[in-house]
Amino acid sequence: MARSLKGRTGVRTRTALAAVSGLGLLAATGCGAADMTKQSSPYVNAQGAKTVTLSVQTWVGAQADVAVAKYLLEHKLDYRVDTVQVDEVPAWDALSQGRVDAIMEDWGHPEQEQRYVKDKKTITAAGGVGVIGHIGWWVPKYWADQHPEVKDWKNLNKFARQLRTPESGSKGQLLDGSPSYVTNDKALVKNLGLDYQVVFAGSEAAQITQIQQFAKQKKPFLTYWYEPQWLFNEVPMVEVKLPEYTDKCAEKGAADPSTVDCAYPTTPLQKYLNTDFVKHGGDAATFLKKFKWSKDEQNEVSEMIASQKLSPEAAAKKWVEKNPSVWKAWMP
Amino acid sequence: MSVATPTAPEAAPAPALRTALRHPAVRKLLLLAVLAAILVPIVNAKWASGSWPHALTVDASGPLGKASDWIIDNRDSHWLFLYFFGHISNAIVISVRAVYLVLLALGWAGVTAAATLVAWRVAGVRIAVTALVSFAVTGLLDMWVPGMQTLALMVVAVLASVVIGGLLGLAGGLSDRTFRMLRPVLDTMQVLPAFAYLLPVVMVFGIGVPSAVIATVIYAAPPMARLTALGLRGADKGVLEAVESLGATGRQRLLSARLPLARKELLLGLNQTIMMALSMAVIASMIGAAGLGDRVYQALSAVDVGAALAAGIPIVLLAIVMDRTTGAAGERMGAEPSGPKWLRSKAAWAGVAVVTAAVAVAGRLAGSQVWPASWTVAIAAPVNDAKNWMVDHLYSGVPVVGGTNDWAGHFTTWVLDPIRDGLQDAPWWGVLLVVAALAWLIGTWATALTSVLAMAAIGVLGLWQPSMDTLSQVLAALVVTLVVGFAVGIAAARSRRLEAVLRPVLDVFQTMPQFVYLIPVVALFSVGRAPGVAAAVIYALPAVIRITTQGIKQVDPSAMESARSLGATSGQQLRQVQLPLARPALLLAANQGVVLVLAVVTIAALVGSGALGYDVVTGLAKGDLATGLPAGVAIVCLGLMLDRVTQPTARRARKGA
């Protein structure tokens, strides 16, 4: 008797509570359909401020784009800017849902472009950043000066011994970065018959820290890296020539990534905006569409952020004060 | 007599064998050996030994890839999303926004006043001062706005966890059957690395605050549910009978007797839920949580430890304030409320509200609502200088002992590589047998079966090799953690002064987000598995030290007294009395250690530890369900197995994790 009573109480309380919480939820959200893809961040437009949310990618070049855009939006156009750090592919997803309004620097994601820009039309291309990106393999200049022949991939096997680390074992170490970056390195090592082991640092931060540490010791290393990048100012590096990039190789790679045996293409970096934001974003959307600068200008800001340890905001302020002629052209 | 003598030598082995057989451990092992003798040849003939046989794997990438495409294509049209997930997500956005707007409206003065007064009322003057200082420091570090974003998210996540956990706990506390079903699930959820939850949540809800809140709730609700159920079940039978004899209805009994009697457990559950939610603050920034966690994450990707620390300190302070406040509230249960007279009266909560409102208005009239920009201190530069100095002087070429980089190299070559290769080359059925033996020795046949099935699941997923890699890192880190942790813990138990010095240090290290450790360890130990192990050791040590110290100090004083009166030296006391009696605590420390180590070793994929964590990072970074989800499941299985083989009998309430 006592037991059955207990059980019933439990059920009753539970249903009552569930009903209450369910009602509360409905009251809060209304009874109709709730489209998740149209919900924005809870932090935007607090207290009547006009807010723009920018996606910041993990590499510092993208942070420089965002820092300058943010500074100008806040100080010249009176917006509040929120930044969210998101990895590349999820950023496309977030942009499509309107969780962020803009991606300031994209290195080429054909699959996502097809899905969101061409098919669903939730994202609109907003032109180039003005910077051309290039991925490749690099060695430190101090080492290449002593051994100029290292600059050709055909000679890399001769140097494998020097590049051994505990992680790469009996092979030479090819240092790679974040898993989210575009990379064919495993296929390249295999298809070019190189005596190397790809070691993934797991994040760009870890990779940069490792490169800086190697450079301090003047040790040789071989790394996956890309341009434009501020680290070149701190650690001068020379590119290793890989087999030339051809359309044929690209087609083969698109069909089966494990067959790639040529260098990486060069990519004009692109901006993308959320389609609704383009329509209703006013001055901010116009400004972001017009935003365009050169590799050197971007690097100037990147370097202030990353090696002089200025806050992105301070770096952007310094650059904006020095280069009014560049940014005045972006104003709506 | 003379007859017995010749038979004695023959009879001697028999009783020895019999006593051995009477020992349950030996019986279990023997049974397992018999089982192995039968099964291994069959298995070996069919699939050969070595790594997990390919014939026994299932490739899930096809269906998973399709599932993820389906979700993306239907997210804005299918009823499941429009009428179910959409409302959940919307409710979260609205609640977080509401709390955030209230916090902003109160301004820094109002929020600080409210936090201080509440702490004063429930926990006393000292904790009120801690709260005041913590909020001031958050402002001083220029972290006010992100701090409020994190606070708003935490308030919503903790409330949701308490409601959901409380309801589950209520169900488990009132019905035996539900309790039996819930208990193993909750026990298991508590040991799983938070990292494994992120990807499935993000696939459904997309990057952003709703995902962050949901992942946090999944992680933080189990302790509330467990402790609520335990509290309700542990209620004094006599009191319940008395209430029943007074003719109380079921509901009256629940509200007037069972829940009040379980107040201590409920508060402890709240405390643990808050701590676990805060420990998710940074990890959840990987899926768009914004706030302080995002600042830590952004700073780390620019290799800026100083800035990461500036954002990490407010998280630690927030955690300490909330921990102490709820902890003290639990301890002072039933005692007089503290504070000045107007705070002690019945209308105190109204008083708190009035004073807060007054301070908030005053703050508004005085000018700024967010912390004034001129009152901030930049700590990033000096912290970075200190880190660089340390790295410059420790990295390499230190005379005699060698640099940290050399140690890392040796550790990788001499410890990590052999363990990994050993595990990867060992026959897969051998690994299963060892796991079964360990789990059975320490638990029941059910524990053994769970562990073996968990390991088999990893094999079926086709992730045997990377899992063995992860396992090797966990084992290496665990050994280091336990050796150092037991040594320091024993030392702290024997010296009051050392314990006093250690306490605040342990507090800070335990609440510091794991991410903050990752970059300094790369600078010291190079990219690879060694920095991951180092970060894991740093993260797991505080819990191990603390449990060891407590275990040894709680040894029955009368046992110590009698040992001393028998003239035992201090070393003998330790070896022969304290350590054996503290054995349960030491085992608990090992269990905690293994859970914490696994959590960090998987996150350490961000600094090059590879293996399973790398697949999860890849899955998150590329939105690739087919890579990330199986790896996440494998981490879960590994965690389950490791927990079961280190967990003796009854589990105690645990903190953090």
Image: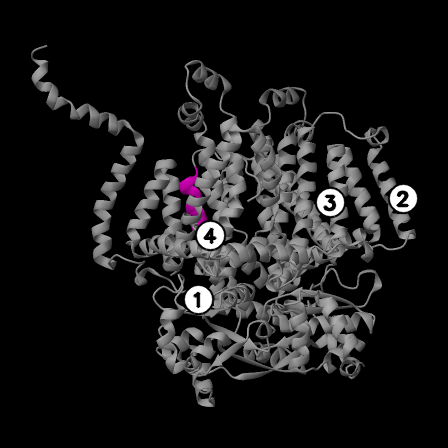
Residue A199, labelled with which disc? Answer: 1
Query: Quick check: B108 above or below B498?
Result: below
Q: Amino acid at mark 4?
A: Val
Residue B280, labelled with which disc? Answer: none
Q: Nearer the viewer, residue B34 or B547?
A: B547
Residue lying farthest to the bottom in this orientation: A247
Colour scheme: one colour
Q: Is residue B644 left or right of residue B504?
A: left
**Circle 3 marks a residue in which chain?**
B
Residue under label 4, please give it.
B533
Give the Cα separation between the discs numbered 2 and 3. 21 Å
Badge 4 element: helix
Badge 3 element: helix
Residue under label 3, please give it.
B134
Q: Position of residue A307 (x, y in %)?
A: 63, 68
Give the Cα separation between the discs numbered 3 and 4. 32 Å
Q: Position of residue B246 (x, y in %)?
A: 68, 20
Which of labels 2 and 3 is toward the front?
3
Residue under label 2, please give it.
B358
Q: Amino acid at mark 1?
A: Val
Q: Amino acid at mark 3?
A: Ser
B255 falls in the magenta region: no
